[in-house]
């Protein structure tokens, strides 16, 4: 029996025992989304790295394709996709079959397209909308039904809600808001005071639309000239760092926070801070910051070759220690699991793709072609998910339970309306299928 199939048998058995089977392959949702890829960069810290996340072993193949692209999260056996056409889809991560689809509307009933990326926590999917006065919307993760909306935050949200400590953090109208995840009520807001320049003048320096990062009870946000560390519960200041020359120096890109450190691009250099004190501890001489693991910084950068980018790994001290083998191709994006770096490859001719690169020596473990350059990757439960023009799941050959194809067909032996009464049939089908793999 494959590990993937074994996990799904156990997950389904638990769901049947608790009366939680509500759809094809549906699983009970956990309270906090732990153990999955809960936001576009994996976690509230934007790290692009989940330490216990394992990907598939070679040989691999596309297990299923879902005919919509966009940004997504994967939690408790379901992929939540904010599609390019502006709706939210829940997809069974086992076989790619749809669980539900929700079209977002405003409080007045007008259509409102979803923008950016979903975040999943507390059995809820959080998204923002594209309208001039955008909403923050919370949907029930099991059904897609509306739980609450907040539509009085101003305009220009950062399109990436971040959820941690029971709060939803979003930048709207250049102000950071902390909303109660269960109700949408405002806990606190942070609107930076103007900064004082060298000549004693006051100068506005509002927050950028980049997503904030949250770790260890602190939320980190950037303006053009400052990095702010604020307490999660009240928004109180913990520390602030500012560039030396506001005329020529800036912060750029999203901050990334992990246990004990926060990293951000400052003056075109990745700068790593002690998260508790704000002391600058080290720097990495690159302009890009993509992944922060327990021992390395990974950056997708130009390699010097024409029209080709690569990913490189650095020690926190700034020393380069890792690079992929030369046969990988031009890299557009990267995330990291426990054993490999997973790279989205730029389209060359008719082929784009996803490659797994060994974390020890950079050798290519496998490559799979995709229809378009992947804009986002995630690694969860021996599966790599990639979204370009469509969402695909990549697994080891033989680990493709259901083979639903993402076209709305449910797996053999049950339908999307499976109830607890049909649970015995579902479990028996899973047992028979996994028995053929022993």
Image: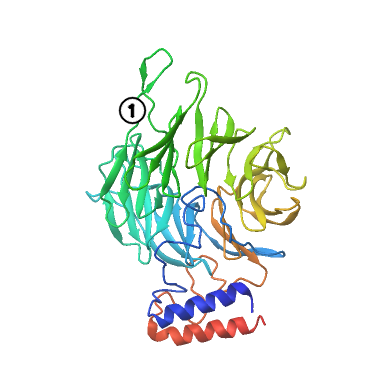
- What residue is at 37 percent from the left and 63 percent from the top? 123
Relative to 20, does residue 352 appear above or below in the rendering?
A: above
In the image, 49 versus 195, the foreground residue is 195
In the image, 301 versus 420, the foreground residue is 301
Q: Is residue 69 visible?
A: yes
Q: Can residue 106 be seen in this view?
A: no
- What residue is at 42 percent from the left and 57 percent from the top? 120
- What residue is at 52 percent from the left and 19 percent from the top? 248
Q: In this view, does 269 lie to the left or right of 255?
A: right
- What residue is at 43 percent from the left and 81 percent from the top? 16
Quadrant where the N terminus is found in the figure: bottom right
Relative to 220, does residue 386 appear above or below in the rendering?
A: below
Please count the marks in the image: 1
Relative to 98, does residue 216 appear above or below in the rendering?
A: above
Q: Residues within 10 Å of mark 1 (few under 14, many from 20)?
A: few
**Residue 85 appears at what percent x and percent y?**
42, 50
**Residue 199 appears at what percent x and percent y?**
41, 12
Q: Mark 1 points at which residue?
A: 193
Label 1: which secondary element: loop
Quadrant where the C terminus is found in the figure: bottom right
**Residue 337 appears at what percent x and percent y?**
61, 56
């Amino acid at each position: 029996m494959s590990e993937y199939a074994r996990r799904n048998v156990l997950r389904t058995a638990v769901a049947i025992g608790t009366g939680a089977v509500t759809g094809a392959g549906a699983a009970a949702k956990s309270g906090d989304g732990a153990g999955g890829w809960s936001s576009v960069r994996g976690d509230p810290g934007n790290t692009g790295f989940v330490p216990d996340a394992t990907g598939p072993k070679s040989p691999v193949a596309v297990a299923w394709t879902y005919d919509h692209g966009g940004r997504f999260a994967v939690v408790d056996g379901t992929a939540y996709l904010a599609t390019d056409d502006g709706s939210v889809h829940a997809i069974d991560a086992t076989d790619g079959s749809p669980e539900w689809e929700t079209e977002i509307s405003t409080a007045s009933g007008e259509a409102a397209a979803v923008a950016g990326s979903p975040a999943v926590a507390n059995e809820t999917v959080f998204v923002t909308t594209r309208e001039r006065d955008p909403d923050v919307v919370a949907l029930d993760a099991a059904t897609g039904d509306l739980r609450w909306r907040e539509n009085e935050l101003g305009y220009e949200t950062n399109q990436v809600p971040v959820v941690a400590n029971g709060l939803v953090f979003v930048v709207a109208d250049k102000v950071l808001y902390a909303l109660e995840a269960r109700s949408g009520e405002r806990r606190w807001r942070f609107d930076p005071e103007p900064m004082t320049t060298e000549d004693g003048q006051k100068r506005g320096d509002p927050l950028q639309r980049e997503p904030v990062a949250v770790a260890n009870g602190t939320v980190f946000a950037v303006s053009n000239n400052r990095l702010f560390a604020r307490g999660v519960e009240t928004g109180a200041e913990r520390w602030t760092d500012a560039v030396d020359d506001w005329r020529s120096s800036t912060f750029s890109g999203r901050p990334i926070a992990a246990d004990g450190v926060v990293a951000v691009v400052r003056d075109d250099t990745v700068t790593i801070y002690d998260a508790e004190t704000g002391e600058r501890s080290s720097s990495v001489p690159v302009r890009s910051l993509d992944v922060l693991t327990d021992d390395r910084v990974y950056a997708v950068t130009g390699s010097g070759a024409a029209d080709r980018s690569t990913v490189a790994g650095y020690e926190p001290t700034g020393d380069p220690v890792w690079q992929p083998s030369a046969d990988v191709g031009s890299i557009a994006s990267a995330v990291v699991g426990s054993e490999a770096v997973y790279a989205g490859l730029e389209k060359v001719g008719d082929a784009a793709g996803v490659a797994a690169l060994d974390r020890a020596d950079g050798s290519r473990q496998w490559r799979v072609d995709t229809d378009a350059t992947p804009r986002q990757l995630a690694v969860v439960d021996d599966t790599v998910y990639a979204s370009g023009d469509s969402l695909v799941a990549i697994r080891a050959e033989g680990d493709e339970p259901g083979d639903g194809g993402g076209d709305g067909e449910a797996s053999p032996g049950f339908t999307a309306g499976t109830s607890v009464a049909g649970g015995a049939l579902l479990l028996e089908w899973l047992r028979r299928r996994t028995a053929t793999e022993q």
